[in-house]
Amino acid sequence: MWKKECVAMILAGGQGSRLGVLTKGNAKPGVPFGGKFRIIDFVLSNCKRSGIDTVGVLTQYKPLVLNKYLANGSPWDLDGYHGGMYILPPYMTEHGGSWYQGTADAIYQNIDYLEQYQPEYVLILSGKHIYNMDYSEMVEDHKKQGADITIAVIEVPWEEASRFGVMKTDAAGKVTGFEEKPKDPSSNLASMGIYVFTYQVLRSFLIDDSQDKVSDHDFGKNVIPKMLKAGKKLYAHTFDGYWKDVGTIESYYEANMDLLDRKHASALFLEENKVYSNNKFLPPHYVGPSGKVQNSIVADGSKIFGSVKNSIVFSGATVGEGVHLEDCILLPNAVIESKVTLKKVIFTEDSVLNEEDPIAERLTDYVRKHSSENEVSIIDENRFFSSKTDGKGFVNLKELLDIG
Amino acid sequence: MKKVVGIILNNSKKNELDIKNIENKGDPHTAIASKYRLIDFPLSNMANSGIRNVAVMLGNYSQKLTEHIGSGKDYGLERNINGLLYLEEDYLTLQGLGTPNDLRDLLKNIDYLTNIKEEYILVSGSNFVANIDYKKIFNEECLEDCDMLLLYKKNDQKLRFVNQVVLNAKGVFEDIYYVTEETVVENLFMDTFFIKKEVLIQMLRAANRSGILCMNAFLRKVKREITIKAYEYTEFAYYIDSPKSYYEANMAFLDQKIWQQIFNVSRRLIYTKNSDLPPTAYGPRAVVENSLLTSGDEIYGQVKNSVIFRNVKILDNSTIENCIIGDNSIIEENVHLKNIIIEPNCRISSNTTLISSPENPMVIN
């Protein structure tokens, strides 16, 4: 095995329960995003961009869609001879085995994987962020500072700082304090959940943390505060591009809609550092004689015969004649053929609204009546969800409209 | 299809005499239908038919072709055993001196052909846009007692430099001859045939001995000795060899029926090199009607009855009608185009108006 200077570990096992029905058959990193991508494309493309060719993807929750999508890593050029992309689910050992208990435990359980490469540095990444970033600059910073851990941070508006883990730093970027979701934030530098560790330090802290019975085995909550307390060298690396955590239905919706803004789109889709995806073999999309598309994003393989405004139409989706969509998201292969007029609705993957569908007639009125201005609705197989319930509680439209 | 090897010939230069002519639209790397190239069709058809051993004749465009096809990964033809292979053409055909149905290129590769273990060889050109199930044709027509099977289609395009298949009253193969005058060729040879390996080797050796390096002449001579069958292909297939046929074929894809026959056939997708561009972005004032668009496009103006290739920008207040806009082209503000083919990497500066006729579309490069 060739020694690697830096190995990346992507945490992709989370359920993403706040995405509700969007993750019903799929882990969060596998959720479709931005017309033709899946969320994990961004972090994998960043690895390619940064010249990191050895990547472990830690999976746990419903991994089948993700496994199939990631395949052998070749869409992201991660199918090399020396290194490549490896999917790392929990496994049994002679002492038994367990599920990944937290972010730190997931890495701890794969220490043998890291040992194979004897890396100098380990990059811990999350599979739920939308951004285009060169990690090699961060690793360089880490080396220059002689740090034990470097944490990527981004400046957020002060009023939002309390939603994040925030870092207090000195002038040189050295972290002097860390607060997880503070009520009264003393800094607006939010942790992006991206860490460069010096491997030997990481190793010893993980082994130590695994023995700690009261620990939640979480990087943000346990390991980083322990390192700060132990007087280790923590540095912050500031990123000033577009970055979004798509952990909730609202933020998922917002991040998709951000792409309609050319400023955000051009910060993500760089000409020389593309976002790669395993999304081949789709024919160009067709806008029919009755189609109308304004201020929207439309992916290949889709067909548009209706009117689409401020919306994202994903691969293979169909908008039938007489359909009016505004501020909507049609996930891959969603088909809407009955004449509905809808606003701020996400249609889930493969959901179908046929021309003869009995709910179609009254759907327009129902959605208008039951969703407010700043609320996103989700329609999935006749079930109607609202973002207010984190996409969990639902109304069965068929039953409701048949009765009422 | 374990019994079949595929070979894709490069027939382009035999259609147009001037190989440097930029308007030549029959080359295997000719871009079509927003994101494809002509070579994608025979390659995908062979791959989808389960042929795992495919050789591509390179010709004069080796760099463009190898860049596009690469290892064959996008077509599922990157294999440990067999897979994709490139062959070189004869130097005379490289200079454009070949004749139609020339055996020179195959003769040059006779060592490769002799060593093939498969029983049949499927030879194809790359001028046809079609989604062909070779497996079905082979299983139905070829397995028993057939030395050679020629594919032809009923045609209404006016063409020249193509081959006409002649059948007798019973529909049995009679002759194949080359057409030099522009005419409506009724039974158009699709440059595609299955042939038993031994028969091909025999044909090549005979050609080498006699110096008559033309398949047509050989077939005329041996048609009583071997079984030659002709198969009429009845699904959509369009022959591309000129700006006009190129224009018409692109426009044909705006017809949803034709579209379905080519791009929406279950288990028979057409593959191409992946570009990894973001999906199409439509601006607030975009108006798009009856058109094909693809990744990387940014549309702010009006587009009607047009085929837009990858990474094209059409800026505000511009109108595009009945046009084909090539890869990476930029149409600036206030441009009006009608019945125009814009080649890849063009920039049309603002306030330009260009109108030509659909019968004879203007090509801008």
Image (cartoon, grey):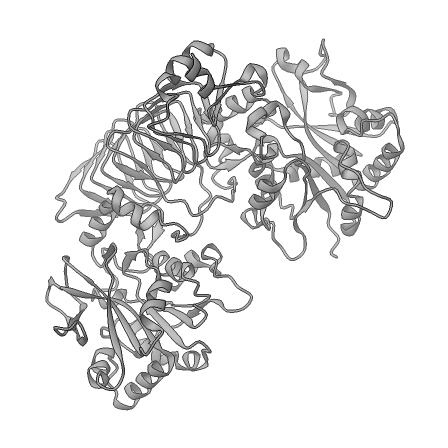
Residue at the image position 44 percent from the left and 63 percent from the top: B50
Residue A34, image x, y percentages? 48, 31
Q: Can I make out residue B97 in this image?
A: no
Q: How many marks?
A: 0
Of B122 and A80, nearer the camera is B122
Q: In which quarter of the image is residue A357?
A: top left
Q: Viewed as shown, does residue B59 lie left or right of B47?
A: left
Q: In this view, does A380 lie above or below A368?
A: below
Nearer to me, B161 or B186: B186
**Residue B134 picture location, percent across and down:** 35, 63
In the image, residue B138 sits, relative to residue A101, either above or below, namely: below
Quarter of the figure with residue A17 = top right
Q: Position of residue B16 (x, y in %)?
A: 21, 64
User: Who's the residue at 26% across and 36% down the image?
Assistant: B349
- Is B212 placed left or right of A333 in the picture? left
| Outermost residue to the front | A403
Q: In which quarter of the image is the N terminus of chain B?
A: bottom left
Residue B188 in percent (x, y) is at 19, 65
Q: Can residue A300 be seen in this view?
A: yes
Instruction: Name the residue located 41 percent from the left edge and 79 percent from the top edge.
Output: B113
